[in-house]
Image (spheres, rainbow, N blue to C red):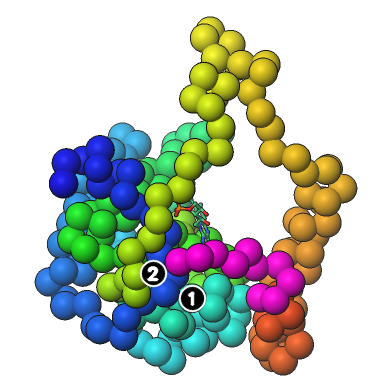
Amino acid sequence: MDIIEIIKKRRSIRRFKADPIPDDLIKKVIEIATFAPSSCNIQGWRFIVVNDQKIKEEIVNQGGAITIKTSPIGILIVYDKRTRNLEYQDHIQSGAAAIQNLLLAATHFGLGSCWICQLPPKRNLRKILKIPDNFSPISYVILGFEEREPVEVKRAHLLDSLIGYNAFNSQSPQEKISTLKLFFYRVFRRFYYLLPVFLKKKFLNKFIDKKFVKKFDN
Ligand SMILES: Cc1cc2nc3c(=O)[nH]c(=O)nc-3n(C[C@H](O)[C@H](O)[C@H](O)COP(=O)(O)O)c2cc1C
């Protein structure tokens, strides 16, 4: 497959076969991630491979997506957060570039993957995975051999409506979400992050999964 085919073929996969992923394959996808561009060429990404079921469950109990515990492995990408450019948060951009490389490499090697940022508060994740202060969790990627081939999904918008020349395209479509709803979601998430784990586990996690987590086909 050439690069364009790989980019178009990649889909978010959340259901996997139980088959384990060989260690050398995990290393190969991580190696490709490290060829991403990074601000000032700092290459400040680090990768935490999570294959211990107890740790996956701990991440889920503390607010992580359920798919974290139902997938064979996960990789948390963290990045050196001592950015010189707070305005553009270039450490997050550099980490995200590595994540996209990782997803494309996974597709190339026949692995399904999904980018997950439904995660516990950063301070909790730091404790669970022993992340030093200088590094910030960027996102988590689940990986495995997919249960079935996903279908191609059409793009949401016409290409021309996304492009502006010398200025933002004023005809560009915008997501329909009211300021109030957005405010509610943000406050709810903040509130959720502050709750003790036993309350989340006992009362909220199942409810949130049912009510708020979008269900996908694959
Ligand atoms: C920044 C980011 C965060 C995401 N977080 C989640 C997540 O927490 N849980 C999840 O199931 N999918 C997550 N996704 C995957 C998106 O739902 C998915 O990319 C989108 O639905 C488009 O589907 P596709 O990747 O198959 O093209 C995330 C994707 C991105 C880029």
Which residue corresponds to the image point at 77% horizontal and 44% vertical from the top-left? 177
* Outermost residue toward the left in this view: 24
Which residue corresponds to the image point at 77% horizontal and 58% vertical from the top-left? 185
Residue situated in front as seen by the camera: 53 or 3: 3
| Residue type pointed to by label 1 | Thr
Query: Residue 142: which disc?
Result: 2
Residue 19 in the image, given as x and y percentages of width and height: 25, 84
Residue 119 in the image, given as x and y percentages of width and height: 55, 68
Which residue corresponds to the image point at 50% horizontal and 65% vertical from the top-left? 217
Count neighbours of disc 2 (C-alpha within 10 A) and say few if under 14, some if 14 to 19, many if 20 or more: many
The number of numbered discs placed on residues in the rendered structure image is 2
* 174 to 72, vertically: above or below: above
**Magenta residues (range):** 209-218
Mark 2–mark 1 Cα distance, whole angstroms, equals 8 Å
Most common secondary structure along the magenta stretch: loop
Report if the CB atoms under discs 2 and 1 are less than 8 Å apart: yes
SS label for mark 2: strand
Q: Is the CB–ligand 1 distance for label 2 below 8 Å?
A: no
* 136 to 58, vertically: above or below: above
Sequence-wise, the earlier of marks 2 and 1 is 1
Count neighbours of disc 1 (C-alpha within 10 A) and say few if under 14, some if 14 to 19, many if 20 or more: some
Q: Quadrant of the C terminus?
A: bottom left
Q: Is the CB–ligand 1 distance for label 1 below 8 Å?
A: yes
Q: In the shown orientation, is residue 74 left or right of residue 173?
A: left
Q: In the shown orientation, is residue 206 left or right of residue 89?
A: right
Q: In the shown orientation, is residue 102 left or right of residue 215?
A: left
SS label for mark 1: helix
Disc 1 target residue: 67
* Outermost residue toward the top in this view: 166
| Residue type pointed to by label 2 | Ile
